[in-house]
Image: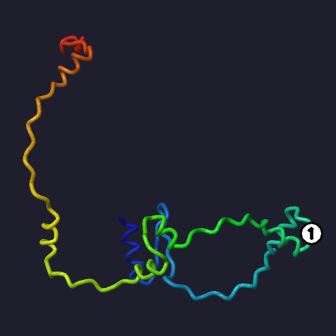
């Protein structure tokens, strides 16, 4: 509690304060910017690091070593029209291109969202017949050779 009061007093004075264990550390809220530091040393290039790790050869050889071998050419895929024909489109390529072009349809009736949802409902069917009552869990257990255990046997 004392620490909080000290921190509040210091904050009101424009100082930043924090506690570390039983110690209150404080200082100015903002300090002046320091001088620019010296330029650091340049690091090694990737090639120089490769040489350090055992690469033997000049930089051109190292660059060539980074490129993998050419892969095997794959088969050319089907064009979109061929895929459409495979998926039951009937017609030539020109007909297919015409089919892709959107055309304005007839103006529909204006309706509400609720009316549209109601249009999706089917006609109510008739209720089915009631089923036969099933067996109780106890009856099934007895059929599966469950041995009856009396509660008094459990409290020994």
Q: Is residue 106 left or right of residue 87?
A: left
Residue drawn at (47%, 81%), measured in percent from left and top? 94
Residue behind mark 1: 57
Residue reaching furthest front?
91
* Residue situated in front as seen by the camera: 55 or 108: 108
User: Is the residue 122 above or below the residue 43 in the image?
Assistant: above
Q: How is the image coloured?
A: rainbow
* Residue situated in front as seen by the camera: 104 or 131: 104
Residue drawn at (79%, 79%), measured in percent from left and top? 42
Q: Quadrant of the N terminus?
A: bottom left
Instruction: Give x and y (percent) for residue 77.
Output: 59, 68
Residue drawn at (11%, 34%), measured in percent from left and top? 131
Q: Quadrant of residue 13?
A: bottom left
Residue drawn at (48%, 82%), measured in percent from left and top? 29
User: Is the residue 41 above or below the residue 78 in the image?
Assistant: below
Q: Quadrant of the C terminus?
A: top left
Instruction: Give x and y (percent) for residue 137.
Output: 19, 25
* Residue situated in front as seen by the camera: 103 or 120: 103
User: Is the residue 144 above or below the residue 51 in the image?
Assistant: above
Instruction: Give x and y (percent) for residue 154.
Output: 23, 14
Residue reaching furthest right?
57
Q: Under tag 1, what secondary structure? A: loop
Q: Is residue 61 left or right of residue 20?
A: right
* Residue situated in front as seen by the camera: 147 or 74: 74
Q: Quadrant of residue 105?
A: bottom left
Q: Quadrant of residue 37?
A: bottom right
Q: Is residue 95 left or right of residue 45?
A: left
Instruction: Give x and y (percent) for residue 56.
Output: 91, 65
Dot 1: few (<14), some (14–19), or many (≥20) neighbours within 10 Å?
A: few
Count numbered badges in the picture: 1
């Amino acid at each position: 509690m004392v620490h909080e009061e000290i921190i509040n007093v210091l904050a009101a004075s424009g100082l930043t304060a924090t506690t570390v264990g039983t110690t209150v550390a404080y200082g100015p809220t903002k300090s002046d910017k320091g001088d620019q530091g010296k330029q650091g040393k340049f690091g090694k290039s990737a090639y120089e690091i490769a040489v350090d790790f055992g690469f033997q050869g000049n930089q051109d050889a190292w660059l060539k070593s980074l490129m993998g071998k050419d892969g095997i050419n794959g088969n050319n895929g089907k064009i979109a029209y061929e895929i459409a024909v495979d998926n039951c489109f009937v017609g030539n390529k020109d007909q297919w291109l015409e089919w892709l072009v959107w055309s304005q349809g007839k103006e529909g009736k204006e309706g509400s969202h609720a009316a549209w949802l109601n249009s999706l409902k089917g006609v109510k069917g008739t209720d089915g017949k009631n089923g036969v009552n099933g067996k109780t869990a106890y009856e099934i257990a007895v059929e599966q050779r469950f041995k009856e255990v009396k509660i008094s046997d459990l409290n020994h």
